[in-house]
Every structure is written in structure tokens, then in C-alpha cells.
Image (cartoon, rainbow, N blue to C red):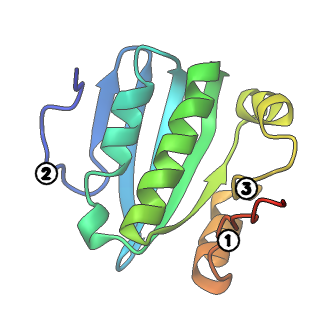
Amino acid sequence: MSQITDTHPTPAERLDCHTAQFEISRPQPRTAVVAAHGELDAANCAGFVEYAMLHAADTDRMVIDLSGLTFFATAGFTALHALNVQCVAEDIHWVLVPSPAVDRLLRICDPDSVLPICTDVAAALTAVHNDPPRLLQLVPETS
């Protein structure tokens, strides 16, 4: 079930979703910074991904700012992969800014650092505008 009722939020709109608050801002044209504060868990992860992708048609670059999270459940990791898949499908270059709680889980669940990560929003904005997108490469099966 969808947690998002307004499909056209204004820039910098804030949405309360269970134990988290989501915000979106547009510091540059076609660039979105989507932030989450509080706790991201199974009750609100799908809502966060949906919220992040609300303006996908108007976005080429996205920074997912999770630096304000105090709790990040394993469902959040699944949500990040869902977000990654959707960004690839929409041709959106994205970068993640983790909090210590997110970083702790990523060290366990993403030891190969597949997800694109930056230390802060400023570095993430630079990365999404300067670095070419990291694409997952399929490895051919050996006989």
C-alpha cells in the first residue's frame, strides 16, 4: 500500500511518514536532493522510495541524503536497491549520503560498495554532476 497521497509535492515539501520525515529540494535544475530524517524501517521504506521518485520525469541527478537517520533497518537496504533499479530505468545518476546508522548496515550488506556513496551533500552534488554513472556490468557465464 502506498503511503504517499500527494503525487505532486512542491520543492522542499516535507512529508511525515511513520517515524521518518522526508524532504525534497532542487538546488539546481533537473537535480533533486531527497532527505530522510528519523527512522527508516519496514513501515516506511517503500514510501521513501516512492517519495524519492515522485519527480523522476524532471530529474537527471539525485542525491539521497540519509545523514539525518538515527535508525536504518535491513528493509532500508532493500529499498536502496529498489531505488537504484528505478534510477537506472529512469536514467537518473544518483549518490547516497549515509548517516552512521546507514553506514553501519552498508558495511555488512554492501561490503563491495556497489551503491554510490559520498560523505556529504556538497560532495554528492559534485559527484552526480561530474562523475559518469557507475553501471553494473554483467559478467558472462563461463562454460
How far apart marks 3 and 2 lie (CA) works out to: 28 Å
Residue located 74% across and 59% down the image = 118
Residue 94 screen position, x and y as percent: 55, 63
Is residue 50 shown left or right of residue 20?
left
The disc placed on residue 134 is: 1
Task: Check disc 1: other Cα within 10 Å, few if <14, some if 14-19, many if 20+.
Answer: few
Residue 65 screen position, x and y as percent: 57, 48
Q: Amino acid at mark 3?
A: Ile
Q: Quadrant of residue 131 in the image? A: bottom right
Sequence-wise first label, 2 or 1: 2
Sequence-wise first label, 3 or 2: 2
- Identify residue for label 3: 117
Q: Quadrant of residue 28 in the image? A: bottom left
How far apart marks 3 and 1 lie (CA) works out to: 11 Å
Q: Is residue 52 above or below residue 109?
A: below
Quadrant where the C terminus sits is: bottom right
Residue 135 screen position, x and y as percent: 64, 70
- Viewer-nearest residue: 58 or 139: 139
The disc placed on residue 8 is: 2
Is residue 25 shown left or right of residue 8?
right
Sequence-wise first label, 3 or 1: 3
Task: Check disc 2: other Cα within 10 Å, few if <14, some if 14-19, many if 20+.
Answer: few
Is residue 74 shown left or right of residue 44?
right
Residue 43 screen position, x and y as percent: 41, 14
Q: Residue furthest front?
A: 143
The disc placed on residue 123 is: none
